[in-house]
Structure formats: structure tokens, C-alpha cells
Image (cartoon, grey):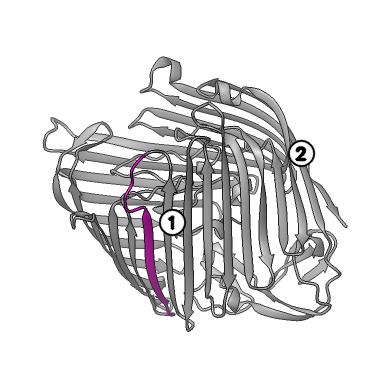
Amino acid sequence: MLRFLTEIRIGTGINEDNWSVEMVVPFASLQYPKQEVQSWGFNFSRYVRNRNENSVWAPIPRQFSIWRLGLAGIIENIKPPPSKRNVRFNPYVIAARGDGLDADLVDRSDYGFDVLYSLTPTLNFTSTFNTDFAQVESDQLQIITGRFSLFFPETRPFFLENSALFTIGVPRETLVFHSRRIGIARNGTRLPMDGGVKLTGHVGRQNEVGLMYLRADSATGEGYEDFAIARYSRSLTNRSKFGFLATNRDSGPHQSQSFASDVQWGIGEYGEIRSFIATTHSNDGVDRDDEYTYAFYGTYNSPNWQSSTSYHEVGAGFNPAMGFVQRRNSRKVHVASQRSVPMDGKWGLREWQPHGNYTAYWDFDGYKESGYLHLDNHFVWQNGANFSTALNLAQEGVRYPFYIAGEKVLVGEYESPELSVSVNGPFDRRWGIGGALNTGGFYQGDRTGLSVWSNYTFSEHLNMSFGYNFSKVDFPNLEKPFDFALTSFGLRAAFTPRVTLSGRLQYNDADDILSANIRFAWLRSASTGFYLVYSEVDDGNSTEDVSHRRSIVLKYSHMFDMNF
């Protein structure tokens, strides 16, 4: 049952033969046009873990998710009250102290605020003064086992809101705009942000706009940098749209711009074609050629077949000052296909998913830098357990030597077959466990890898998680194999729905890095309230004066929600 009133309430009930939930949603929390009588699209889902069962209100083919909005159910004759202008004022005060590398950046007391104003029912203007993101948890540690940059996702709430609007590129590989380039130095330290403004939302039924301007301290420690982003997207029929994106980074003596355009074309119910193209320009005195990137994608998703193909090219000089690039001077081809075979409970199975994919990279001289063939059989049981066996064939062309966990990978061309087995246990109310084992070639040697994950729910108030990733590598030039591991442990206690204590401990033994993050939160609404955060990163391989980063932060924020 769903009703629209002026306050938020949620109630649940378990009866003899059913389970029910009643939600009361305030109109003030929704954005809608001004028509007196309206029709709205809705959908709801319920997931039962121990039966691996997903139920939806409006039917959705199994190859799609609930976010396929064109398949939502329609509720007609809704007569909402006139929409109001929404004003939210969110001030904060903070006291923080840092040690080691964080001493100059964190050791301060400060204040600031965010203000959101609804210019129209579907268009919001947000301004921020002395922006701070002190409550954000530490990044998850990663170990580099290749030659290319690692990708760290955005975690800060200010940038996560409507972040999909500003996304153009290949996820985790080539992004024209990646907000972690604002207010975070390359070594991960946070840079004070003076403030900024943001305008996001819809203008009319088909046009979506996004504008951002922010100012942050320079990573060099001298002066500041200005960041400007503009985005426009227009929706068409049948999941089709096109748009444009432009960015400008002004560092004082140097400016850098990026320009991009993207298009999406829905073909029938199952097909889709997407493409984007982008170019960059910088006046930093560095000569660059081929400052461009582009890609084409094609997908087909039917109830029984899911297939895709893509081509992606990145010029050697492509340099988005507010983006992310994993490989330059490269051409990438990717093909993938999966068959979904319903098993209807035979041997307890729900579905069999044989699939395969192939990805390869070449440089502009035609040299094959990487290739990866993956052939897999994946079985899913009715109770949620799954099991897969895979054959992988990796090809690597190494023109210049590099190091993994301190050991040298030699120049050469390598073909490395690998066998992999992974399993996840059945869904349980309290316990979850899974893992993977792989063994095979690895550059000029061999590698055996083991990963294990688990979580345990003691009660509705307390849960624990654990992860362990281990690799043992044997290179012919070594007297004995070397190994490295990444271990993580997390604990979360919820005293009430609004009062929580969470912590995460991580250890990377390859680089001897220990990371800890503990956060106590007493929330009021919209993630505002009281925060107490302790973070520490100790690097055993660094010199004594820069071997650690410690900070403790006390922050309080309050949301004043005003409608008129």
C-alpha cells in the first residue's frame, strides 16, 4: 500500500500467509510538473535472499532490472498538491587534528554550509561554502598486478548526487570527467575546497542540464584552482538520447579543456547502440598529438541471449585535466556473449549461464599489448548458491620492464593459460561465504591465487565482514617464489537506525601498508548529524618522517528544510 502525505512513515507486518509493507511518502520529497491530474510510473521489488527470489509489481523480463523505467507500471488520476519551492540549508562545524602527511591539511577548526534551492519542481540549484568531506570513509586498498593505473571510485556525497549525468566514457578506463580530480591530490590527500555552485535537473520533459563550478587549493600548495563543468543531454523516444560535455581547469598560468559528445540509440526492445567522442586541449607547454578518444558499443539483451561488442580508441595525447585515463595510444576490441538456460529446479538449479568474452589492446603501431579470452560455465541454484569453472588465456606484450611487489617483469611477449574455480554459498539469514581459486601462467612465470570473502550477521544490530586475497608468484629468475596478500576486516554496529559505529581495517603486505578507519555517526536526516571519525594510514616502506597519516575529525551538521 502506498500513500502520499506530508510525512515519512514506514510500517511492516508479517501475517499467516503474506508479508506487507506500508510506506507514506511526502509530496515535498518528490519532483513533478504542475498539471492538476497526472499519471506516474512506479515499480517496486522484493528480494527474498534464502529463496533467491525477486518479485516485482510491474512485470520485467529477467534480462532487465527494475531501473528499466520504460517498463514501470502506471498509476493514473493522481491529483498532487501544487509543488512547492524547496530550500534546504545545511551548515556544519568541524574540529580536526592531523598528524604526519595530514598535519597541514587536516589540523584545523572550520565551518561551512550547503544551500539547495529548487528553481523549478525539476531543477535544483546548490551552492556550497568552504566545502568539507570529513565523514567520507578511507579508500579500499588495492595491489597493482599490472602496468596501468588503478581506478578509485568517487565516495563524496556532493559529487555523487546526479553523478550519472556528468559521465561520458568507458567506466574505470577512460572518463572525460572524474570528480576525484577535484579536491584530492594524486597521493590521496584531501585539498581544502573554498566552495562552488551546481545546477542540475530537467528543463522541460526531454532536456537535462548540469553545471558545476568549484574552487580548491592547488595540489602544489601554492594558490588555488578553478574547475568548471557543463553538461547537456536530450532524451528521445525508445531509450535514445544525445548530449554534450565541456570542462575547464584553470590552474593560474595553465588552463586545460575537454570537449565531448555522446549518443544512445535504442533499437526495438532488446538492442542498443552507444557512442562518444572527446578531445582535449592544454596550454601547459607540453606538445601533444592525437588528443582524442572515441568508442562505439552495441548490445543485444533478449530473455535467452545477452551479447555486446565495442571498439574504443585513445590517442597518445588525450589528457583530460578532470578525467581518468588508464591507457593511452591504444585501440581496444571487446566481444561478449552469454546464454541463459532456465533449469526449472533440475538438480536444484535455477539457471545455467555459459558465456565467454574476449578483450584485446593494440598500440597505434599494431603491437598487441594485451589480450584476454575468458570461457566460463556458471551455475545458479535455487537457494542462491553459485559455482563457476573458467578457462582464461592472457596475452601480454611488455616493451618496457616494470615491477610487481618489488619483482621485475622482463621485456617479452607472454601467453599465460589459467584455470579458475569460484563458488559462493547459499543465501543464509546470518552467514555468507565465498571464494575463488586460480592457477596458471603469469608473465614469465606462474601464479596461484586464492581469494576468500565472508560476512556474518550477529543480529539486526551487528554484522561483520572479512576479505582475503593472496597470490604466490614463481618467476624463473628467482631463487624462491614471492607472495603478497591483501586482508580486510569490517565491523558495523547499529544501535538504532540513526546511531551507528563502523570500522574497517586493511593491510597490504606487498607494500607494508596498514589502513584503519573508524566512524561513529548519530544522524538526524539526509545524512546530517554528528560524526566522529578516526583515520590512519601507516606505510612501512616510507621514510620515518612521512611514514604515517593520522587524523581525527569531529563534525556536526544540521538540515533546515524549508518549503514555500
The quadrant holding residue 294 is: bottom left
Residue highlighted by disc 1: 171
Q: Which residue is mark 2?
A: 91
Residue 298 magenta: yes
- Write down the region rendered in magenta: 286-303
Q: At which x and y percent is residue 371? A: 23, 57
Residue 220 lies, with reference to residue 433, above or below; the image says above
SS for dot 2? strand
Q: Considering only vertical position in the picture, is 304 above or below 137?
A: below
Residue placed farthest to the right in the image?
A: 564
Q: CA distance from mark 1 to mark 2?
A: 34 Å
Residue 434 location, x and y as percent? 41, 52
Which quarter of the picture shows residue 493? top right
Placement of 133 over or under 438, stated as above or below: above
Quadrant in which the N terminus is drawn: bottom right
Question: Residue at (42%, 46%) from the top-left corner?
Answer: 151
* Number of other residues with Cα within 10 Å of mark 1, as a class: few under 14, some 14 to 19, many 20 or more: few
Who is closer to the viewer here, 114 or 234? 234
Amino acid type, residue under disc 2 in the picture:
Pro
The answer to whether one can see residue 459 in this image is: no
Residue 534: quarter of image: top right
